Every structure is written in C-alpha cells, then in structure tokens.
Amino acid sequence: MHACKQGEEDSVRRTWNEVDQYLTDLLVPPEPALDAALAAIAAANLPAQSVSPLQGKLLHLLARISQARQILEIGTLGGYSAIWLARALQSGGRLITLERNPRHAAIARENIARAGLADVVDVRLGRALDSLALIEMQGLAPFDLIFIDADKVNNPAYLAWALKLSRPGSVIVIDNVVRGGAITDAADAFPGIQGTRRMFELIANTPGLSATALQTVGRKGYDGFAIAIVGTGAPR
Ligand code: SAH
Ligand code: DHB
Ligand code: MG
C-alpha cells in the first residue's frame, strides 16, 4: 500500500483503539476472573479471537435483557465470552459451550472454574455439529440465547441448528459477520466469507426471524455482529 495511505490507515486504527480503551475504562470495570482469563489465553498463545471486553459486555447485556436461563455457545476458545454470558444467567440457569480443540477446552475449563462458574458452564469437547445433534437428543433445548462464534464455513448449519434448538423469542447472535468488509465480496475465496453470506441468505429467507447487523470497529479491527430474534413463523 502507498506510504501515505498506510499512514492514514494507521491513524484510523489508532483512533479505534483509543476510543475502545476510553469506553472500556468507563463502562467495563476491571473484573479479576475476566482479566485472568484473558491473561491465561494470551499466556497459552491461543489465537487472539476472544471478543473484546466491550463486546463481551454486549453479550452479557443481551443475555440479561432476554433474561436467559439456558444459553448455548458455539466456539469456546478460552472461555472469555462464555464467562461474560454465564455471569448474566438467571439463577438456576446453565450455559453449554462447544469446542473442538482439546487445548482450548482445557484452558476454558480452567478459566471458567477460576470465575466460580464450573457448576453452571458445561464445556463440551468435539465437533460442534456432533455436539449439537447430541444436545437435541438429550432434550436440552430450547435455549433462550445462542451465540455462534466458531468456524464460519459452518455458519449456515449453525444457524439452522440454532433455529431448531430455540423457541419464539430466543435471541441468536453471530460474531464476525463483516470481516473488514469482505462480506460484500461474492467472489471472496475464503470459505468463511461464503459461509456467512449463505447464513445471511438463510436469515433473510426464514419467515418470522427478525434480524439486524451492527458494524463494529475497535481493538479487534473492523467487523460486526448479527442479532436476531426467533419468531412464530409468521413474517413481521
Ligand atoms: N467465543 C470465543 C471465541 C471463539 S474463537 C470468545 O469470544 O471468547 C472460535 C473457536 O471455535 C476456536 O476455539 C475453535 O477451535 C472453535 N471451533 C472451530 N471450529 C469448530 C467446530 N467445528 N466445532 C467446535 N469448535 C470449533
Ligand atoms: C477472528 C476473530 C474472531 O472473533 C473469530 O471468531 C475468528 C477469527 C480473527 O480475528 O481472525
Ligand atoms: Mg468471533
């Protein structure tokens, strides 16, 4: 990239980071268990794919607003978003989170235990598509809130499962739906982009599923969330 353009881009990113820090300092008070989870995730060299503190707080608020008692998360990593969500559960509530990488799951379990949430969070090791089928067979649905944040190529299948495992009024949140703007590129070679595009088409073609998407900037760059509420099947 041209040196001058690169300079402009650096300055924009610096602003995103400064505003992210400013808002985090004021709105997300330090919380030992969450801070320790992020430190452990970094120390273990897990990918820097946890939601940011402000985004974690958004998930937490959505779970509280919807008074969630049963939460399902697809894609655990080190348990950072799971801790945010589990801390929003109504008393007696539970969260199931799905992770295929044994190292990630082990670190998540440690972080969740340190947060005092081992009794309410069930980290299930395995391919999410397998775990979802088992969850259905075990009669653990419906979930009040479902957070989809795993391999983006499977986003259409995860959305279909979320619809199967939900009820009218359930909230579905999907992470990383903008990817620096790549989402509008129908020819993008990355399978994850095609997966998320197919997922948006499925949302658009599901009667009664009411959705929006927010473009986000901040310490995680330029990305976005989709947020949907399950309907009764009738359009509105
Ligand atoms: N929600 C986490 C971040 C998840 S990163 C947070 O914000 O804290 C995505 C995770 O999904 C990774 O840990 C990855 O190992 C896991 N994953 C990817 N494909 C998967 C699959 N098919 N089944 C289950 N987990 C998967
Ligand atoms: C990335 C970020 C995420 O939140 C995620 O779920 C996967 C990948 C990333 O920054 O590459
Ligand atoms: Mg993500």
Image: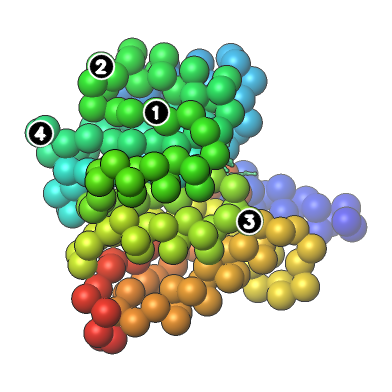
Q: Cβ–Cβ below 8 Å for labels 3 and 2?
A: no
Residue 18 appears at what percent x and percent y? Answer: 52, 41
Q: Does the residue labelled 2 lie within 8 Å of ligand 1?
A: no
Residue 71 appears at what percent x and percent y? Answer: 28, 44
Residue picked out by circle 2: 116
Place residue 32 in its image quadrant. top left
> How busy is the neighbourhood of tag 1: few (under 14 within 10 Å), some, or many (20 plus)?
many
Task: Give the distance between the C-alpha atoms of the residues marked 4 and 2, in whole angstroms.
Answer: 14 Å
**Which one is nearer the viewer's eye here, 143 or 55?**
143
Residue depth check, mark 4 versus mark 3: number of the one nearer the observer? 3
- Hey, which residue is sitting farthest front in the picture? 137
Residue picked out by circle 4: 91
Residue depth check, mark 3 versus mark 2: number of the one nearer the observer? 3
Q: Is mark 1 on a helix, strand or loop?
A: strand
Residue picked out by circle 1: 123
Q: Is mark 2 on a helix, strand or loop?
A: loop
Q: Cβ–Cβ below 8 Å for labels 4 and 1?
A: no
Residue picked out by circle 3: 153
Residue positioned 54% across, 45% down in the render: 150
Quadrant including the C terminus = bottom left
User: First in sequence: mark 1 or mark 2?
Assistant: 2
**Which one is nearer the viewer's eye here, 85 or 141?**
141
Task: Give the distance between the C-alpha atoms of the residues marked 3 and 2, in whole angstroms.
Answer: 33 Å
- Position of 100 compared to 188: left or right? left
Q: Cβ–Cβ below 8 Å for labels 4 and 2?
A: no
Residue positioned 33% across, 28% down in the render: 122
Q: Which amino acid does label 4 sit on?
A: Ser
User: First in sequence: mark 4 or mark 1?
Assistant: 4
Place residue 14 in its image quadrant. top right
Q: Cβ–Cβ below 8 Å for labels 4 and 3?
A: no
Q: Where 4 sits versus 122, above or below?
A: below
Q: Cβ–Cβ below 8 Å for labels 1 and 3?
A: no
